[in-house]
Each structure stands twice: as structure tokens, then as C-alpha cells.
Amino acid sequence: KSTMNRHAFGIPIADFQAARWMRADMNTEIDAARLLVYRSAFLADSGKPYTREASIGKLFASEAATRACNKAVQIHGGYGYTREFPAERHLRDVRVTTIYEGTSEVQRMVIARQLIG
């Protein structure tokens, strides 16, 4: 089952404006995260300092992924919490990305330290 097959009030859930906007936001944030990560990789490959940019990319990407998974579960409604849909597993798995290799708070400290000095 997918949101394309599920209906609410006789309308496919995928056709609801709120669901479309959520998917648009998810796509926008994931694309922005990808570009931030590419920027830090480009700097690293060029032999330039990239600490701040890597932290920005890691912070934004991990939190954008978490927001995307939360929205995916929301779009699926109650089914989003069942093991029948991958959204449940993705939401569980994505949480660790804000923790390993430096928590989001640590990334913010690194970014702030680089801005100051």
C-alpha cells in the first residue's frame, strides 16, 4: 500500500494539498542538504578548510532527514507506525543520524566556534 492507493474522503491521500506541500518541503530540504554536503566535500578535495561547512552539512542533513521521516509517517497516518510501511523503520533509523559523529548540539558548537574565530 502507498499513499497513492489510500483514500480519505474519496480522494487519494497523495492528492491532498497538505501532503503535496509536505513532499515538496521534504524534497527541497533533502536537495539543500545534498548541496551543503557536496560543498564541504569540494572544499576537502581542494585542500581547503572545511570544518565549518562539514558541520553545517551534517547538522542540516541529519535534521532534514528527521523532518522528512516525520512527515512521511504523518502522510501515511496510522499506517506510518506499522511495520507494513518503510516509513516506520526510516523514522527509527534516522534518529541516530542526529547523534553519531557528533550530535546536532556538537555540530552547532563547532559552527559557532568557527564563526567566532
Image (tube, helix red, strand yellow):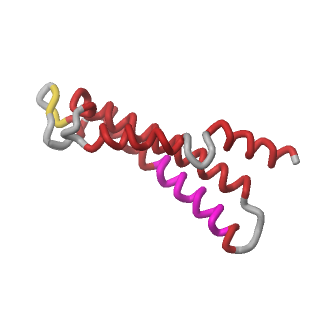
Quadrant, the N terminus: top left
Extent of the magenta region: 28-42
* Residue 106 in sight from this viewpoint: yes
* Residue 22 in sight from this viewpoint: no
Q: Position of residue 57 (x, y in %)?
A: 61, 52
The residue nearer to you, when weighing 21 against 45, is 45
The residue nearer to you, when weighing 49 against 8, is 49
The residue nearer to you, when weighing 6 against 107, is 107
Q: Residue at x 69, y 55 (%)?
A: 53
Decide if residue 71 is on the left or right side of residue 5: right
Residue at the left extreme, as displayed: 10
Residue at the bottom extreme, as displayed: 46
The residue nearer to you, when weighing 98 against 48, is 98
Q: Position of residue 78 (x, y in %)?
A: 23, 27
Magenta highlight on residue 106: no
Q: Position of residue 66 (x, y in %)?
A: 46, 39
Q: Is residue 38 above or below residue 81?
A: below
Q: Is residue 46 above or below residue 33?
A: below
Q: Residue at x 21, y 32 (%)?
A: 79
Q: Residue at x 19, y 39 (%)?
A: 84
Q: How many marks?
A: 0
Decide if residue 31 is on the left or right side of residue 45: left
The secondary structure making up most of the magenta span is: helix
Q: Residue at x 37, y 35 (%)?
A: 71
Q: Position of residue 96 (x, y in %)?
A: 48, 42
Residue at the right extreme, as displayed: 117
Q: Is residue 105 above or below residue 36?
A: above
